[in-house]
Amino acid sequence: MNEVMPPSVRKALRQGVVIPAHPLAVTAERQLDERRQRALSRYYIAAGAGGLAVGVHTTQFEIRDPAYGLYEPVLGLAADVMDREAPADFIRIAGICGRTGQAVGEAEAARSLGYHAGLLSLTAMKGATDDELISHCRAVAAIIPVMGFYLQPAVGGLLLSYGFWRRFVELEGVVAIKIAAFNRYHTLDVIRALAESGRHEDITLYTGNDDNIVVDLLTEHAFQCGDSRRSVRFKGGLLGHWAVWTKGAVEMLNACHAATSTGGPVPQHLLTRAIEVTDCNAAFFDPAHAFAGCISGIHEVLRRQGLLEGTWCLNPDETLSPGQFEEIDRVYRAYPDLNDDQFVAEHLHEWLR
């Protein structure tokens, strides 16, 4: 897999970076807005993100619908911007989903477009046994390095056992895992499986736990494994939440890295910041309505900044939930130091060129 993931990219992945889940820019007619799609990619690169995840949930699963046929075009647009403007160690991750045939096809497409890894969703594998799931993951990992994905069952993810994860981390080609279980018990299943496998130096954890982003990044997870005690940390995040206010997210991750590098006590101000970030996420991701407005909420912030023209999604039923607009107003007022509106305003004309 060396030709797919260069050593500099693997090093960046191991160190931990901000990886926004790339939204989809569409017009009022629900057609791809290529100009604004490129502008979003430029924003994330300029904000200091260390990678992009394209073709994931935030990019809207409808891009795979034959009526749109946007999976490869959207991945291609982002790849073109990254080719031209991103540093050499910038991490390119493609969302991969579907049953094995579809997943293998998407992995081949992503690899051909220069992506380094695939974020592998197992949502379509409902009802599969652990043996079938492992076979599925192995088939994809034979084509492109894999980032595992524990998606919370509340939004369609599978409940995955410790036993599954213990086998998954043994697969050749697994380079990282995004944990978005929104559940401490399930999160610990993955981390303990990784620690006990002894592959914690080879496989990097990224948080997708939107309700616990900062605390995930600050916490040392330690397990007694035979005669040794092994420590595992989340190194970065791959988050739809980080598709907005991205410059601040980069600064926050740097602060978490600095705090944990000393081995000393976690600064109180970072624990306070953790609650502020979760409160903002509640406004953006709409847990009050079972996350129905999670994509529209991200779009609304980007619309206010001028990066998107509107909050439209390919699915006309995906809109802001009742009261969500006002909730976004509230967190803007409550945490004015978290947004990067001024940074965006200063560079928007460059990105929209």
Image (spheres, rainbow, N blue to C red):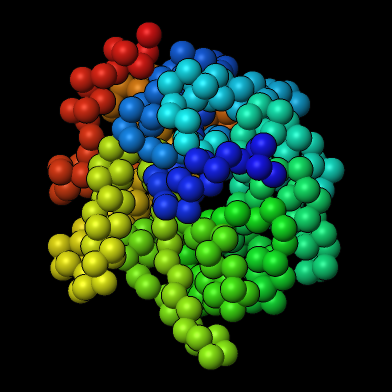
Note whether residue 62 is visible.
no
Quadrant location, the C terminus = top left
Q: Quadrant of residue 326?
A: top left
State the image coordinates of residue 203 (x, y, percent, origin top left): 57, 60
Q: Residue furthest bottom?
A: 227
Residue shown at the point (38%, 38%) measured from the top left: 49
Q: Can you say whether 236 is above or below 294 in the image? A: below
State the image coordinates of residue 343 (x, y, percent, origin top left): 22, 28
Quadrant location, the N terminus = top right
Residue shown at the point (20%, 74%) measured from the top left: 265
Residue shown at the point (28%, 65%) measured from the top left: 260
State the image coordinates of residue 290 (x, y, percent, origin top left): 48, 56
State the image coordinates of residue 206 (x, y, percent, origin top left): 47, 56
Please give left or right for residue 220 compared with residue 103 in the image. left
Please give left or right for residue 336 compared with residue 291 in the image. left
Q: Quadrant of residue 106?
A: top right
Please give left or right for residue 196 compared with residue 42 in the image. right
Taking depth in this image into account, of 211 and 79 the one nearest to the observer is: 79
